[in-house]
Image (cartoon, helix red, strand yellow):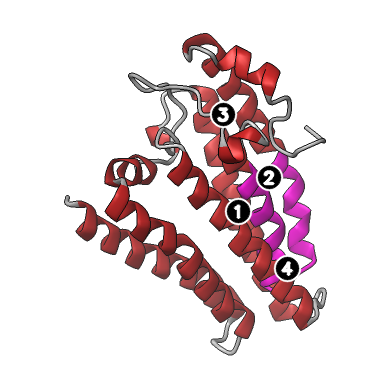
Amino acid sequence: MKTMPKLLVFGLAELLVFGSMLFVPAGTLDYWQAWVFLVVVGVSAWTPIVFLLRSNPAALQARMSGGPTAETRKAQRVAIAGLYLTLAVMVVVSVLDHRFGWSSVPAAGCLVGDLLLAGGLGVVGLVIIQNSYAAATVRVQEGQQVVSTGLYGLVRHPMYTGNVLMLIGIPLALGSYWGLVFVVPGLIVLAARIGDEEKLLQEQLAGYREYTQKVRHRLLPGIW
């Protein structure tokens, strides 16, 4: 399938999935946080996609070919499946929290969540722009070189840093404090994915061991 038609199909499917995950558990369309959430996700995710479609369609294609079944390493299949499950449960619990009033996030808190969500998606998009090897699956490509500039000069896995921002932002954006409970398992899954990925990179990517000595932190600057 050509890139543009595939993108349109992917975008429509994503909209339907997100919409059902938001409005079906909510039991109503009168849920402004969910509408803002959809707009933020749409704009923040599609801006880098449009840019890559014009500047580097190969990198975009690689990024779209992901998911548990696309991974070649068992540890990565388990990790990505765990991350998807964590995100899905986080969204549904956050929506149910809003519906039944288990907790109440003020409008300002919801907007902070939207900013974190947009920031996380923006970081992920910038990573793909800065590193054309940043595929959705963990593997070393032919001719791949270590990228150590831009966001990679701050942490070794900036894409996952964007994921952390998203994990925190999603529940707040949807008006839930209880959804934040799932940040912890999300971080555990990301840490496991990073551990296995680093093992692969140190074994197969020339110069990566030296890079780890230059950039000491994996996920969060000054922390880990």
Marks 2/1: CA–CA distance: 8 Å
Marks 1/4: CA–CA distance: 13 Å
Dot 3, crowdedness within 10 Å: few (<14), some or many (≥20)? some
Three-letter code for the amino acid on which mark 4 is drawn? Leu
Dot 2, crowdedness within 10 Å: few (<14), some or many (≥20)? many
Image quadrant holding the C terminus, namely top right
Q: Which residue is the site of mark 4?
A: 172
Q: Earlier in the sequence, mark 4 or mark 3?
A: 3
Q: Earlier in the sequence, mark 2 or mark 1?
A: 1
**Secondary structure under badge 4?**
helix
The image quarter containing residue 78 is top right
Q: Which residue is the site of mark 3?
A: 148
Above or below, comparing residue 70 to residue 91 in the picture: above
Outermost residue, left side:
1
* CB within 8 Å, label 1 to label 4: no
Which secondary structure dominates the residues rendered in magenta?
Answer: helix
Highlighted range, magenta: 161-187
Instruction: Determine the residue positioned at 56% across, 16% down.
Output: 208
Q: x%, y% of residue 28?
A: 57, 86
Closer to the observer: label 1 or label 3? 3
* CB within 8 Å, label 2 to label 3: no
Q: Which residue is the site of mark 1?
A: 87
Q: Earlier in the sequence, mark 1 or mark 4?
A: 1
The image quarter containing residue 134 is top left
